[in-house]
Image (cartoon, rainbow, N blue to C red):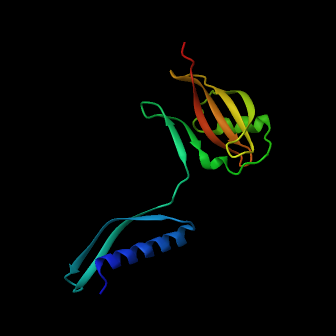
Amino acid sequence: MLSPQQLSSLALRTCRERAEQALGHEVHVQVVASQTEWHRILLRSVFEQHMVVWKPCHPFEVIAQDDGRVVGFVDHDKYKPPGEADLSHDEIVALVLDEELIPAGAQVTGVQTLRGPRGGRLYRARVALRQPAREYAELEVDINPVRPAVVAVRPVEKAHG
């Protein structure tokens, strides 16, 4: 008969292997609780273990206001792959306005070409809000043209003066 520690290790390893096989990528498994109880009908000990399985995630920043409302993000994984792809102004505007954090009525007021943090071309669009927030009236939106995808949305703080 295996000890509870041996059963726990075996269950953990089996769970990880089956989850990775089913999901097709590396997972993390954490034991939440385990117990061994005598089963009166089966007349044997039954080992039960609860586990949590999750997929590792890449760095992702969420920008929120004091009230908890999400106003932006930075998805570091979407900066990859860097490259030199081109997008037309219309394609950039379409990507920006399709982003769910960009409110209806917002308007792209300018686009500049930059080098991304991992090299390659990056577009940064400036977006004016039709109904400005108290803290900001514009957003900056980064686009990776190789994907093509929105990489980040950041509020631009109003100048205090």
On the image, the x and y values in percent for residue 17 come to 49, 74
User: In the image, what residue occupies the spot 51% across and 58% down?
Assistant: 56
Name the quarter where the C terminus is drawn.
Answer: top right
Give the residue at the far top of this rendering: 161
Image check: 54 left or right of 50? right
In depth, the one of 74 and 134 nearer the eye is 74
The image quarter containing residue 66 is top left
Figure check: 146 above or below 105:
below
Figure check: 135 above or below 45:
above
Figure check: 75 above or below 16:
above
Image check: 127 left or right of 30? right
On the image, the x and y values in percent for residue 141 come to 65, 35
In depth, the one of 115 and 79 nearer the eye is 115
Figure check: 62 above or below 38:
above
The image quarter containing residue 116 is top right
Number of marks in picture: 0
On the image, the x and y values in percent for residue 58 come to 56, 52
User: In the image, what residue occupies the spot 51% across and 40% down?
Assistant: 62
On the image, the x and y values in percent for residue 123 come to 72, 37
Name the quarter where the N terminus is drawn.
Answer: bottom left
The image quarter containing residue 29 is bottom left
User: In the image, what residue occupies the spot 61% across and 39% down?
Assistant: 152
